Amino acid sequence: MSTPSGHAPLVWFTSLAIAGAGIMAAASRHSDIGQAAQWDALAAGAVALGAGLLISTLHLGQWARAPLALRGAGRSALSHEVLLAGAALASGVGLLAMSARHAVDVRIGLAVVAINVLFLLSIGNVYRVRGQRTWGGATALLPLTTGLVCGETFVIAIGGTLVPDASAVWRTVSIDAMVFALGWQTWARTAWPSARRPIAVRRGHVLSLMRLLLFNVAPVVCLAVRWPAVAMVPVAIGLVLDRCLFYAAADQHTTEAELSSVEALIGRDARID
């Protein structure tokens, strides 16, 4: 279940971008944490998203090719992701500049929330491609749910005692756990049984359980015992693990992939005989 080396830039890009957009979305709606804490949260989100966009150029191979991703605007999911990524970062930085001077209008904050939520949805939409059996359905919602969990957890950690209510974390964690469970079921039914090594199935279940414990159980426990800063650690690790699992579960349904799967099964049966 290791992540292919070609996916490493995507793992780090999506991890940082999801966390950054989620933090900015949560910070934009949490004016109750105070101006200073809101500024810190927005800055953390903008830095994370900016770092993710920088890393994404490694996947393109050449910096000069980056603008080419915009040519499909209006018809390409990747182009929409690139445009919304820029809009999300720009909106966060703009809100950051405004919050440094005075309290931000609620309507502006909600607009920033909407832009970042759209960007998180666009990440999942990029991977809804024909023939890919494990990246559609509920799995496409994981960037949104994981981003919101990261955002609410990190904002509470940054705001500390200034946050009056942590109920948003309970809601987002519960929704994310359900979405991940549906994705886990899909991976176990389609991707892992076709693995060349049977141990990959067991390892997939173990890593999925670890992700669920780190990302959905640990932050709830940390917040319940009033350790908000500690909650950021398992959430960050769980997010990276979530992305690794996502790419490791890729199952492209093509003629070549089907032939490889049949050959693997024949070879496995021959070894058993």
Image (spheres, helix red, strand yellow):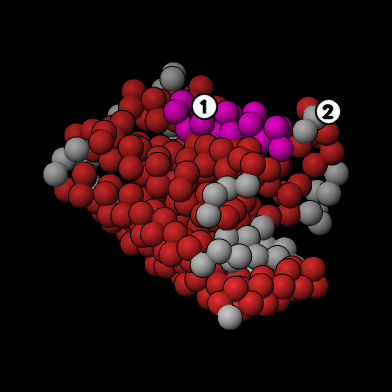
Find numbered disc 1 in the image and state the secondary structure of the residue it sits on: helix
Label 1 environment density (alpha carbons within 10 Å; few <14, some 14–19, many ≥20): some
Q: Main secondary structure of the magenta part?
A: helix
Q: Residue at x 44, y 28 (%)?
A: 44
Find numbered disc 2 in the image and state the secondary structure of the residue it sits on: helix
Q: Is residue 56 magenta?
A: yes
Give the x, y percent position of residue 214: 33, 49
* Quarter of the image where one finds residue 62: top right
The answer to whether residue 101 is above or below residue 144 is above
Q: In the rendered structure, which amino acid carries the disc numbered 1? A: Val
Range covered by the magenta-colored residues: 43-59
Mark closer to the observer (1, 2): 2
Q: Nearer the viewer, residue 103 or 265?
A: 265
Q: Which residue is mark 2?
A: 64
Q: Image check: 9 left or right of 166? A: right
Q: Image check: 221 left or right of 12? A: left
Q: In the rendered structure, which amino acid carries the disc numbered 2? A: Ala
Alpha carbon separation for disc pair 1 and 2: 23 Å
Give the x, y percent position of residue 174: 33, 62
- Mark closest to the chain's N terminus, 1 or 2: 1
Q: Is residue 199 magenta?
A: no
Q: Nearer the viewer, residue 209 or 89?
A: 209
The answer to whether residue 180 is above or below residue 82 is below
Q: Which residue is mark 1?
A: 47
In the picture, the disc for residue 147 is none
The answer to whether residue 20 is above or below residue 146 is above
Is residue 101 at all visible to an observer of this figure?
yes
